[in-house]
Image: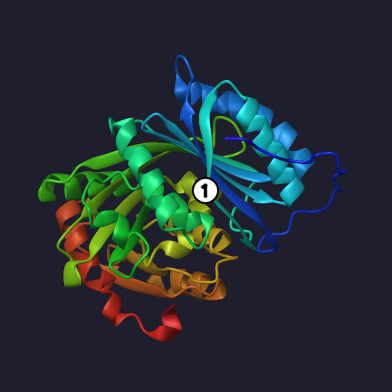
Amino acid sequence: MELDLDLSTPRSRRTVVPGETVDRLLCASECRVQGSVFDEMHRIRDHALLRNARDQVYVALLYQAGWFLEWMEGPPEGIDAVLRRTADDPRHGSLRVVHRSRGPRRLTQPWSMAFRPDQEPPAHFERRLKALSGQPAPDPASAWRRVSMPREDPGAAGRADTDRYQRVLVCAARGTQSFELVRWLGQANGCEVISQRLAGARAGSMDVANQYVDLDGGRGGMLRRVVATARNGLQIGLLQAFLSDYSHIVLLLCGNSKHDADLLHSLVAACARLSHRPVLLGLGRADCDHAALREVARGGGLVYLDCDIDDAANAKALWAAAEPALDLSRITTSQW
């Protein structure tokens, strides 16, 4: 593609304000990295943080099926500068812009990224890119979802941005129960569990795991994606950018008041700038202090529902307790 960009105008330095109106761009490119793509993405991050700060541009980068998908937000001249550098970068080939618009800033951090090491053929990813050109998305988040849906079910992409597609996030106050629950759901329903890595602007400590499973046959034929994330994942800008898409966040409580409260405070901080806030569902033994957790949630403008469960270590029992509360028809308008 040819990029006719005039970068001669000096860029003004200013403070980035979450929620401000900015230019938003999504572009895709073939990955031409030799060797470890995940390691190379860390090197891209280190260089991008220095250069993009100058241009006041926030970036989220996805690797999937041999492709990069890059989401940028910032002033138009800054985005054009980042786009030009990407076009000239030998690690990116066949660059194409798939979405450009102006609207509210959704990315909360200068840099975040996702690495999805699945075996999806590159041709499937490219097919969704071409489909998007015929059905423009209203915003970059919507375009990102449509392109990154790793499903060849013809109806899946069409449901990605409708009320027939529900997203549920699961996070545990301690341990790996959220991941155990998602893996059990995959096994019990004969569905593939997709793994990915997320990383934020800081190296090392901000690299976290993420797993999800897509379940068919829910209420009214709804497709339900259940996502497990590590607690640190709540601090990553890319995950925060999609929090408003979740109907519920299921909290697997441990009964330790400090750990449970820390999880609630992390969620309140992550959801602070959202226009739509997910309903929180706290699952734990009877000794969990739901009243205190409800007050923390209420202080952050979040609805908190509680559910006591005898065997909090049993994935089947956890899902049996959580699933009835995920019925969208039971959520009142005031809870959205």
Q: Position of residue 52 (x, y in %)?
A: 71, 38
In which quadrant of the rendered view does residue 46 lie?
Answer: top right
Quarter of the figure with the N terminus: top right
103 versus 128 height, above or below = below
Of the 4 image quadrants, the one containing the C terminus is bottom left
- Report the residue at 23% width, 57% height from top: 155
Residue annotated with mark 1? 238
Residue 133 spot, x, y in % from top left: 44, 51
Nearest to the observer: residue 306 or residue 153: 153
Image quadrant of residue 286?
bottom left
Task: From the viewer's perspective, tell me whether residue 15 is left or right of residue 96.
Answer: right
Tell me the kind of residue under disc 1. Answer: Leu
Q: In this view, does 280 lie above or below 137?
A: below
Residue at image x 52%, y 54%?
Answer: 140
Residue located at (39% from left, 45% from top): 130
Residue count near mark 1 (Cα–Cα under 10 Å), binned few <14, some 14–19, many ≥20? many
Q: In this view, does 326 lie to the left or right of 64?
A: left
Percent x, y of residue 73 = 64, 51
Q: In this view, does 323 lie to the left or right of 280?
A: left
Is 71 positioned to the left or the right of 11 in the image? left
